[in-house]
Amino acid sequence: MSKGRKNRRKLGGVIVQVGVVACWAAVYYGFFLLLKPDTLLKQLLNAFLSNLVIFAIMGSIGYFFGHHKRIDFFQKVTSSIRRIGQGDFSVSLDWNKDHPYHPLGELVASINEMAGQLNQMEQMRQEFISNVSHEIQSPLTSISGFARALQNDRLSPAERKHYLEIIETECRRLSKLSDNLLKLTSLESRHHPFEPKSYRLDRQLRSIVLACEPQWREKEIEMDIALAEVTIFADEDLLSQVWTNLIHNAIKFTPNGGTIGIYLEQHGREVTIRISDTGIGIPEEDQSRIFERFYKADKSRNRTNSGSGLGLSIVKKIVEMHNGRIAVRSVPGEGAVFTVTLPARPASPHTA
């Protein structure tokens, strides 16, 4: 239906309303003729009818223009929803409490909030794809370059072996990146197996320290261990990944002859695990972001120690699945302390 035809229909509706009021006015005035000219009843009815006619005319005019505004309002809402459905998340509907249809303000606020969240998710998706592409491209470039270099017949056996070792290292890096991506995706899908049971947390930590002994002995790192006997109800396999990651990071960033501390305590219904090192530390501006995917604090930390930037994201997700929390405290040049706090009571997967 054309816009002009719609306006004619609305105008017709207004004319009908005014006509009805006019007919009632004629009836009332006919009734007034039967009354004595100076009766109080006639004066009151005359005043009432005059106000009624004025109100009806003003109401009809208000309806005509108000209906037009209402149509425009719903057209904007429909258009915004259509744009969101087409992938345009920059939608923002204007609304304030003085809007003529403020009861629908909650709807407008919900649409704006939904568009904002979808826009944020889209930005995160694009950033994620960009980061994955970068992490994959770097080792692939190395593999391709050294593979071409191996075609040189004049390479010595030592050079050839060195190039092959680099290719093998980059292949392991790609494999680890793939494993971590799959692991993080699985953890965030809410369908990852969560099988809590009662076990001794101190024994688990001690076992992981022994498994890492070749790495910390090679760097002559002193291990300061103080583990209280603590029984916890949690997924043993998942928490094993947390401690392994944190201890490996501590070993990686602690210089030769440094110290790593691992402490376990229980205070009431909470269990606290602290893993500290005397490494290069983490800049203050990076400490709030190190648990983000692919974020690498202080590029100097990765100059000699490559990583995908997914390990701490996995750690945080597993801790949150146990209704726990993780924090970091660090002074550059003095090392870092990671503190994990878990409930000692039975836990269920975190679903927030």
Image (cartoon, grey):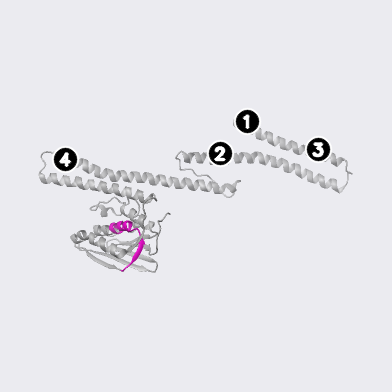
Q: Secondary structure at mark 1?
A: helix
Measure the C-alpha gap from mark 4 to mark 1. Answer: 77 Å
Give the mark nearer the N terminus: 4 vs 3. Answer: 3
Q: Position of residue 211 (x, y in %)?
A: 23, 59
Viewer can see residue 166: yes
Measure the C-alpha gap from mark 4 to mark 3. Answer: 104 Å
Report the residue marked by disc 3.
26
Quadrant of the image occupied by residue 144? top left
Q: Residue at x 60, y 32 (%)?
A: 3
Measure the C-alpha gap from mark 2 to mark 4. Answer: 64 Å
Residue 75 badge: 2
For the C terminus, give its image quadrant: bottom left
Give the mark nearer the N terminus: 4 vs 1. Answer: 1
Residue type, mark 4 in image: Ala
Q: Residue at x 31, y 66 (%)?
A: 264
Q: Position of residue 251 (x, y in %)?
A: 24, 59
Q: Is residue 92 left or right of residue 246?
A: right
Give the mark nearer the N terminus: 2 vs 4. Answer: 2
Give the mark nearer the N terminus: 1 vs 3. Answer: 1
Q: Residue at x 81, y 38 (%)?
A: 26
